[in-house]
Image (tube, helix red, strand yellow):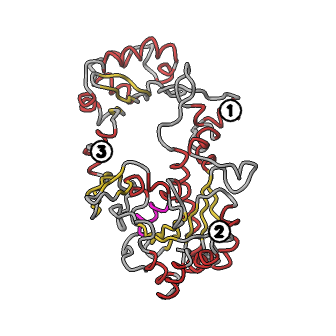
Amino acid sequence: MLPGGQSHGALRGVVVLDITRVVAGPFCSMLLADLGATVIKIENPKDPDYARDFPPVLESAAGEKFSGFFAQFNRNKFGLTLDLSTEEGKATLRKLARSADVLVENFRPGTMDKLGVGYPVLRKENPRLVYTAISGYGQTGPYRRRPAYDNSAQATGGLWSMNGFADRPPVRVGTIIGDLSATMYAVIGTLAALRHAERTGHGQLVDVSQQDSVLSLTENAVVSYTVDGKVPSPLGNEHPFVKPYELYPCKDGFVFFGGYTDKFWRLSCHLFGRSELVEDPEIDTMAKRFDPAVYERRIRPLLHEWFADKTKTELEEIVGDAVPLSAVKDIGEVVEDPQIAARDMVVDVEYPEFGELRMFGSPIKLGGTPAQPRGLAPKTGEHSDTVLRALAGLDEAEIADLREKGAI
């Protein structure tokens, strides 16, 4: 284990080489690091991860700057620089691969092969290596070489066409769901392949596409098309068939209300003082309330009546423990939310030069080996010497030679 590495966690002892940038790859390796893996972030010394310049920015008293964005997605990692365009850099990566369990990269397919350090090469160095490749369209298929961003996946995975309102152009999902969904599937695939490698001694390629990942998030869209020939279109805040199940205005904002089942509808009627509606023959069953005309004429006006003169907090206090009703909160409200605090989902990390950084914690709660999200992100190449000594077996003279040749 590297000096200063994690001594706990479910993935303690697992070594991950992280040759990624921006979000999809760094987030994947960060989740592994939070769970105890030793993650080595490898950056080109001449062209490091450009997310290091993304806002918001922490600033030290001396004027040094550090990206809070970068810090959040690269915590708990060691920093190593390595120029893979040099022969010395390639040779060093091959040495590191012999000691690694996992390598994660998010280049366009073929880039690592062109550099001479793709999976076929590294597999010869270490047959048990799990090689996780995250890309826009995957390692196979006619689009494999196309450049891609999150929006590319939202556009080609179908999600963008479904989001927004029927009378307006489609709207992208308001976060980088293409990157984030690929991250989750990459972590799942990596852990599955790692389990297989530990059992058999054989690693494998884990191929995760942003387009594939987004498509899998489109709920019933695929089967609606393949079974009924229906192409889903934007529905705004409505569900395709479940009603009531959407956004409703209240005194100080909006709430989501999902009391559509017969059980939840009955409870809602009682809690809002309209018990007689439980037996109303026009709206007494879920199937009747799903009817669009009945919903617009009877249910929607009723909910507006119930919610209009009450605040988000008041509505949650009335029905929150009995019926699915949730305040629509902005990020400021979420960060200060007592449930978020109870779940340790906003963590404080102290950077010696820059002060405190508050960022999201780990959503993975393990009873025996909890995740540790309060780690620092490395400066560019901060741990190069330590990593090369511990994992590549290089001595001081060899490391100095690599530095002189510009390989690190």
The residue wearing badge 1 is 225
Rendering quarter of residue 35: bottom left
Instruction: Answer whether residue 323 is visible to the viewer in this image.
Output: no
Q: Is residue 233 above or below residue 381?
A: above
State the quadrant of the N terminus: bottom left
Answer few, some or many: residues within 10 Å of disc 3's Cα (few below 14, many 20 plus, some between 14 and 19).
some
Residue 204's label in the rendered image is 2
Q: Could you say whether the residue bearing mark 1 is in a helix, strand or loop?
A: helix
Identify the amino acid type marked 3.
Val
**Do labels 1 and 2 touch, CB within 8 Å?**
no
Q: Could you say whether the residue bearing mark 3 is in a helix, strand or loop?
A: helix
Rendering quarter of residue 60: bottom left
Answer few, some or many: residues within 10 Å of disc 1's Cα (few below 14, many 20 plus, some between 14 and 19).
few
Decide whether the magenta segment is chiefly helix, strand or loop.
Answer: helix
Q: Nearer the viewer, mark 3 or mark 1?
A: 3
Specify whether residue 35 is painted magenta.
Answer: yes
Q: What residue sits 37% from the left and 73% below the top?
A: 8
Q: Position of residue 226 (x, y in %)?
A: 70, 35
Q: Nearer the viewer, residue 219 or 14?
A: 14
Q: Position of residue 402 (x, y in %)?
A: 54, 80
Does label 3 or label 2 sit earlier along the sequence?
2
Q: Nearer the viewer, residue 5 or 162?
A: 5
Q: What residue sits 64% from the left and 59% below the top?
A: 207
Q: Nearer the viewer, mark 1 or mark 2?
A: 2
Q: CA distance from mark 3 to mark 2?
A: 40 Å
Q: Could you say whether the residue bearing mark 2 is in a helix, strand or loop?
A: loop
Per the rendered image, the range of residues in magenta is: 29-37
Identify the amino acid type marked 1.
Tyr
Does label 1 or label 2 sit earlier along the sequence?
2
Identify the amino acid type marked 2.
Gln
Q: Position of residue 292 (x, y in %)?
A: 52, 17
The residue wearing badge 3 is 335
